[in-house]
Each structure stands twice: as C-alpha cells, then as structure tokens.
Amino acid sequence: MPRDNFNKTVVEKLARRVAFACSNPDCRNQTVGPKAGPEGFVTTGEAAHITAAAPGGPRYDAALTSAERSAFNNGIWLCRNCAALIDRDVEGYPVDKLVQWKKTAEARALLRINKPSMLDAAASLADRVNVLSARDALSRVGTTMTAIARSLEELDPRFRVTIAHDGSVPSFSIEPVDGPVNVSMNLRDNAKTRQLMQRLYEYGQRVTLDGKDITFNGTPLLDGLNGQTRHVSISNPLNCHAVVKLSVASKKKKELEFLDQGSATLSSGNKGFSCDAQLFGGCLALSVTSDGQRFHVTATPTFERWVGRGIKVLPYFDQLRKLRDAARLGLQVDIVVEVEGQRLAAGHGKLPMASLGYGLLDFVEEMRVILHQSPIDITMPKELDITAEDIDRVHQLAGLRHISAGSMMTATVEPQTEHEVESLLRSISVSRPTAMRLAQLLDVHAFGGLLSEKEIAVEISHVVMTAGRKKIRLGQPVSVKFRATRDSKVSYVLL
C-alpha cells in the first residue's frame, strides 16, 4: 500500500511554523544552516508523521483518511535523531505527547519572532540602557516588558502575565484570571524538591525551583517557557489583604517595642498558612509559617538596598540593629499577622542568631562609631570585600569606647617637639587625670580601600599616665601606661 507522504508545501509549513527547530522540548536543535562555501544550505530535520503514513507503522490510525494522514495536522518537525527516536519507542512517544510537542514548539517560535529570546532581549536591553537618559531607559524597559507580557497572554487568555525586571533578568508572574486552571507539571525527583513541595502542600509556602527541574503541560503559555527560565517560584496566594507586625522586647523594660509592619502575601496549605513580608523599607525579608499554634519565622536582611548609600545614613539601620540585639540577647520577638484588620494569628519567641547578618551589621556599626565626628562618609559598595584583618582592626578601635574605670592600656609614644616632652613629663608628674591622644593608621581595605591610608586619632579623656621619667626624650620612643577613670570618654578623629 502506498505511503501517504507530505507534499512540499506541508513540509515547508511544518518547518517554518517552528522556525526550523526540532520540536522535541529536550532537543530544540536548529535543523537548517549554510553549507561550506558561498552558497547553498543543509537541512538536518524532517517532517515526521504523528500517526504513521502506512499500515504497520508507528501509531498508525486506520480511522484517518489518506488526505488526513498527509495533512499538516498529522505532521511534526523534528531533527533526524528525534524522528528516529519517536518511531522506535512508540509507547514512550504516544500521539498526545507529540501533539503537545508541536503546540509548544510553535508557541516558542511565536515568542521569539522578530526578537531574541526573552532572557537575551532583557540582557541586551540592560547592556544598552547605560547610554540612554534615565527617563528613556525606564521607558524602553517598560515598553519591552509590557510587549512580552501581552505576547504571553495571547497564547492563553486564561492567564494574566506581569513582568518585573531587576536590571539583569526578567521575572514572570502568571496568575489565572477567572479561577483555577488545570495545569500539570513534572518535577525532577530528588530530596530537595520533595522537601520544598511538601512545604507548599502543607503551608502554601512559596517554593523556588531550578528551571531545569520542572516542566509544565496544559497551556501553550507555560509550555513556551519550559527550558527558558532560570528559576520557577510556585505559591498558593489567598485573595486578601494581610499585614505582618514586628515588635521586640525592650532590654530594660518588659513591654514590647514596635519596630515595623508591612503588607504580606498570604498563602494556605492543608496544615496552616505562610506569609512573606518586606519590612524596614525592603531591608528585611520576613517569612512566617504557622499551623495556628506554632510559629516558624526566618528574618533575612537584604543589604542590597544599602548599595550606594553613605554608611552614616543607612535607612532602617537602627531597626535592624535592635532586631540583631534582641536575637543576640535572647529577647522575645513578637509577630502578629492580621487579615483585613482582624488578627489571624500571633506568636512570640527568639530568633536564632544565625538568621541575621551579624558580621556586616557589627562591622558597619563600628565604622559608623569611628567616623561619627568625621566629615567623611563612606558609600556602601555593591561588593563589600571585608578581610579578617579589617574586622579585627576596626573592632579593636571601636571597642575602646567601652573602656571602664580601672582599665589599663599600654602605648608607645614618641614626642616630636620639646613642648610634647614637657606636656608628657607634667602629666606623669602630677598623677592627675589628663587627656591622651594617639594617632595610628586606620588601614581598612573594605569600601574599595578608601580608608587604607587614613590616619585616625583616638582621644581618651581623664586618664592617669605612668612611665619612667628618665626615658622620656625628644624623638625617643617610650612605653607609657594609661589607667582609665570613671570619667574617661573616647572619641575618634580622622586626620
């Protein structure tokens, strides 16, 4: 019996509808390209039959007419390897799977027509905006993102698509317009994925998966994004307005001190709920899960909001410091979740010390102490390269402000003028509290090395000095001991 082959028109239509790319979503190889030399091209793809062209072939359907077997609807464009694969493993590649491949490949080609892939387009745009004015750059970013969102919605009007751009890659938010939509997804089976999906199932907690670990079926919109996303976040949000309020116990009093509140995204599961909120102007990400009785809270500072700001005027630094102190001292942290003005749940407990970025907060706080009286402010860089030596040096200097009565210190001084010799001798001879000033190289390489060659003077008032009087000579180093009194105070001056 003769085969019902495709004619030339159908073959060209199958190839062009998918931009000459293999329709297998795990392959997608280009199947056309130039020959060596100035002319000609080669094709490594073929128009494969979804149901066989003749009896006895793979997936043969006797109910089809000869015209239907050779029609466009019965064809799929594949590379030669994938075409051979689907015919040798009929059970692994049934008709419905191949039809879905075809729809997905066409949807992907539609997204890319007259433009590179969405991720490449966004990256390319980000590379170009630095030569535009700020207004033009924002306008072009917004126009491109809106156009991509509308293109995606045309693939499946049951969904609403919004796209955000953080300067490097776009993120797509896809939500049903009129109620739930049945969509299936295949996940790579591993312990991490199972744990994340369990959180989603039990508490509705947002989970983020590697784009390579998940594929969707059931809508051309999501099919077209398979393999093009770096990460996929899934949640089950409730359509209600939620607010999270954060308070901490005072160090000296029993009452709570309110720190901040923020709008929250509330999600539910079969055991309880979860919510995510941004507090302190976006400087703190707070995640809460609860079964109505117990709370689990994670607090994550987002220091990216400080990039480009002077460390003396960092927004919400004091609030983050109070939260850090509460966790460090084991003080109570109180969380309240309200929905449309009604209290949904409340809990209190202690934050684990590992939940906050103490190292950076401590370092910046001590730098703020040292630079407090200086006209210099240091801009927080994007990459804060802090060495162990920087941390030790700054900690020792800033730690002097906690000097207590009776504390003993030793320093080597070297008077450079006769007046300095006389002042030192007089201070030692009277054994009365006096002021001391020591200068040394700050030598901090963080913040781009801006403080690596700066000298700082440490001034301590009301100290008692002792030293061998005969050893005090012009230009000669001498070891001097200082004893702090209850009136001693420390200040720093950047020279």
Image (cartoon, rainbow, N blue to C red):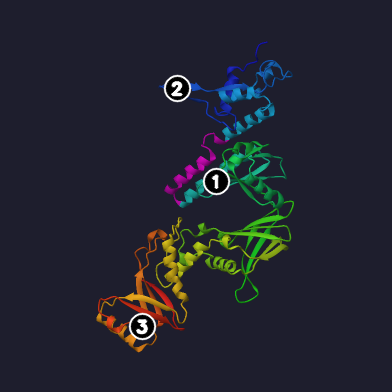
Look at the numbered disc 1 and give the secondary structure of its residue. Answer: strand
Query: From what the image shows, is residue 67 above or below residue 489?
Result: above
Can residue 495 be seen in this snapshot? no
Residue found 61% across the figure and 73% down from its top = 250
Q: Which residues are magenta?
A: 111-133
Q: Residues within 10 Å of mark 1 (few under 14, many from 20)?
A: some
Residue where numbered disc 2 is placed: 35
> Which dot, 3 or 1, sits closer to the camera?
3
Q: Within the image, what quadrant is residue 224 found in?
A: top right
Using the image, determine if residue 399 lies above or below residue 284.
Answer: below
Q: Amino acid at mark 3?
A: Thr
Would residue 93 be found to the left or right of residue 125 on screen? right
Q: Residue at label 3?
A: 466
Look at the picture and state if 324 lies above or below 110: below
Marks 3 and 2 sit apart, C-alpha to C-alpha, by 91 Å
Residue corresponding to mark 1 = 170
Say which of marks 3 and 2 sits in front. Answer: 3
Q: Quarter holding the C terminus? A: bottom left
Question: Are dots 3 and 1 in contact, CB under 8 Å?
Answer: no
